[in-house]
Image (cartoon, rainbow, N blue to C red):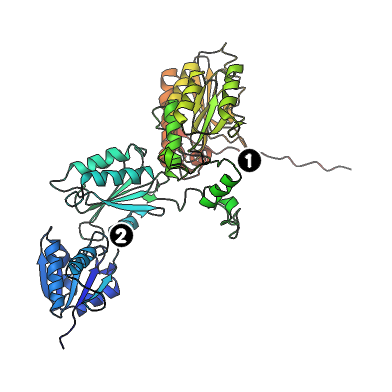
């Protein structure tokens, strides 16, 4: 009776011996024949003994699979090697295809064992920090075997769904446009500042790691040995590490030892209003699901239509809205538009016509919430957020995003009588309102030295005084340790104000820790945009005199 052959399809990981699993080592040792791509054979040469080597160049995968099957059918034990995981863009599927074409059956044909290895998405992620902590996908940009139209659709879908994305085979000597087109598609859905990791030859001799952004990624070397990992809307950078939180909606608070939600409470429907069970319950009771978005529009514009479209895109990315209206179940609104509405930066008077319009738009299912910051928060279910935003803008309403973004809080400039500084407030709003920051940031703006709207107690305060501006940083207006901001500059010329404040905010946006308020950031870094922090004096409580 002839010996029955065996096929061992081995993934040996990124290439370093420390990352080859024990079973992969055993499989290579027990094999009589090693079949692999030239580079892969060279990577594991130190653990080879006297095996027969069948090696071929790139693009010869089919011939390798056919040869491996032929040798196994001759009764030999054959190892087909792949870097990373053999089942992910490796040789496992191709070997099975060749076997099936020959009529192979698991019980009667040659024995097949697939031995998993560490894939590039995981090895590269470990070098970057923890970028793949939430839903992720892998996409190969090689269009030699897959039509580019299909690849582009997959990129579009992954981008819209807010997946963390790992790009394999991103670029070669002849394929240079694919990565450019991929960036173009992704920028339709993601901020230019989205963190991107480029890892070349992970855990090999020529390993190279670059942490960049979606906008800047093409300014760095990218080749066939590079894996590109693109973060989702929650991914952030901290001390050179690329980190994606475990979930979009946290059920835990890292700064607390005792969590607000006990372990048994975290899985209850009430604690996860974004879940399918919660949505179904809302539908049964004809309730409208609500959400609070921390996502913002592009920082260079605050056009109301884009605000509305961004709100819809965020909901689509988080699974709370369909990408096509006709795909939604009956009774479920396509999106919840949530936006801050006010009559203007300096204007604090809402007309009766504007109030009627707000009530009409909110209808029976929407809601209007008044805030102490001279805004109304409008939340309304709609499948046409752009039209809603256009109606509000046409009525003279100013729309702003909400959440962990920059918001300008200005006074009424004595009902416009002291309006010299209004253009500067409006320009700051245009440049900074909606910029995503680690924690909600209010900029207080007062048009005279009276500062009656409390700018000096905000985290960033601006006071117009005698033709120039005073700048205050680091205030805290709530809590038992509330304190005014520090006056860091006096007499700033008007032409320098916008740039100075913008630099402060952008340094905070780039360097602040997640959920770190500006006053804590200022205290931690000690200097921001050239303005120095100084410890505020603690209050002294006089001792009470004792008497007879």
Q: Where does label 1 land, which residue? A: 481
Q: Residue at x 29, y 71 (%)?
A: 21
What residue do we see at 44% from left, 18% from top? 494
Horizontal and vertical percent for residue 233?
Answer: 41, 43
Residue 157 found in image quarter: top left
Q: Disc 1 or disc 2, which is closer to the eye?
A: 2
Query: Considering only vertical position in the picture, is 394 above or below 371?
Result: above
Residue 143 in view (yes/no): yes
- Point out residue 48 in the picture as x, y percentages from the top left corner: 16, 75
Work out whether residue 216 can be spotted. no
Q: Residues within 10 Å of mark 2 (few under 14, many from 20)?
A: some
Residue identified by numbered label 2 = 123
Horizontal and vertical percent for residue 539? 66, 38
- Tell me the CA gap for discs 1 and 2: 45 Å
Q: Is mark 1 on a helix, strand or loop?
A: loop
Q: Which of marks 1 and 2 is nearer the N terminus?
A: 2
Asked whether the residues under the numbered discs 1 and 2 touch, taking CB atoms below 8 Å apart as contact, a structural biologist would say no
Q: Which residue lies furthest to the top in this view?
A: 417
Q: Quadrant of residue 435?
A: top left
Q: Indicate left or right for 237 with 459 as reference.
A: left
Residue 362 vs residue 493, the one in the foreground: 362
73 lies left or right of 336: left
Front residue of 209/60: it is 60
Identify the mark at residue 543; answer none if there is no mark. Answer: none
Nearest the eye: 540 or 253: 253
Badge 1 crowding class, 10 Å Cα cut-off, few under 14, some 14 to 19, many 20 or more, is: few
| Residue at the extreme bottom of the image, as rendered | 1
Q: In which quarter of the image is the C terminus?
A: top right
SS state under label 2: helix
Measured along the vertical axis of the image, is residue 317 above or below residue 200? above
């Amino acid at each position: 009776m002839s010996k029955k052959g065996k096929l061992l399809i081995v993934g040996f990981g990124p290439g370093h011996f420390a990352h080859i699993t024990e079973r992969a080592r055993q499989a290579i040792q027990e094999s009589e024949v090693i079949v692999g791509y030239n580079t892969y054979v060279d990577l594991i040469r130190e653990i080879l003994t006297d095996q027969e080597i069948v090696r071929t160049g790139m693009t010869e995968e089919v011939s390798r699979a056919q040869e491996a099957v032929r040798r196994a059918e001759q009764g030999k034990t054959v190892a087909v090697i792949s870097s990373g995981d053999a089942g992910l863009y490796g040789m496992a599927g191709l070997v099975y295809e060749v076997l099936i074409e020959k009529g192979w059956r698991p019980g009667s044909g040659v024995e097949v064992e697939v031995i998993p290895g560490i894939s590039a998405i995981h090895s590269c992620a470990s070098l970057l920090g923890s970028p793949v902590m939430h839903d992720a996908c892998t996409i190969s940009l090689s269009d030699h075997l897959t039509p580019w139209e299909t690849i582009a659709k997959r990129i579009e879908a992954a981008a819209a769904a807010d997946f963390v994305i790992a790009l394999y085979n991103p670029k070669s000597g002849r394929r240079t446009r694919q990565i450019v087109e991929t960036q173009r598609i992704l920028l339709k859905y993601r901020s230019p500042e989205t963190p991107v990791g480029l890892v070349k030859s992970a855990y090999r001799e020529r390993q190279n790691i670059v942490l960049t952004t979606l906008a800047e990624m093409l300014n760095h070397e990218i080749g066939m040995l590079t894996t590109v990992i693109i973060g989702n809307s929650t991914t952030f950078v901290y001390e050179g590490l690329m980190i994606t939180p475990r979930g979009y909606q946290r059920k835990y608070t890292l700064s607390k030892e005792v969590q607000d939600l006990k372990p048994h409470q975290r899985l209850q429907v009430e604690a996860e209003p974004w879940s399918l069970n919660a949505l179904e319950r809302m539908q049964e009771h004809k309730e409208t699901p609500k959400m609070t978005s921390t996502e913002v529009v592009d920082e260079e514009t605050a056009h109301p239509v884009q605000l509305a479209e961004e709100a819809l895109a965020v909901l689509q990315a988080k699974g709370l809205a369909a990408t096509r209206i006709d795909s939604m179940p009956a009774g479920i609104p396509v999106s919840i538009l949530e936006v801050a509405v006010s009559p203007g930066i300096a204007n604090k008077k809402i007309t009766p016509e504007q109030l009627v319009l707000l009530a009409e738009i909110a209808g029976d299912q929407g809601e209007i919430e008044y805030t102490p910051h001279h805004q109304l928060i409008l939340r309304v279910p709609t499948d046409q957020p752009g039209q809603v935003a256009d109606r509000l803008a046409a009525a003279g309403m100013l729309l702003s995003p909400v959440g962990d973004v920059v918001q300008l809080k200005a006074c009424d400039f004595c009902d416009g009588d002291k309006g010299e500084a209004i253009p500067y407030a409006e320009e700051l709003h245009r440049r900074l309102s909606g910029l995503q920051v680690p924690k909600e940031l209010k900029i207080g703006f007062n048009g005279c030295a009276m500062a009656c709207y409390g700018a000096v107690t905000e985290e960033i305060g601006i006071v117009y005084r005698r033709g120039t501006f005073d700048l205050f940083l680091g205030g805290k207006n709530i809590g038992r340790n509330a304190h005014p901001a520090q006056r860091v500059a006096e007499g700033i010329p008007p032409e320098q104000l916008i740039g100075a404040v913008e630099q402060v905010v952008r340094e905070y946006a780039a360097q602040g820790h997640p959920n770190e308020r500006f006053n804590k950031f200022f205290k931690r870094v000690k200097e921001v945009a050239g303005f120095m922090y100084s410890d505020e004096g603690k209050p002294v409580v006089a001792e009470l005199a004792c008497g007879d």
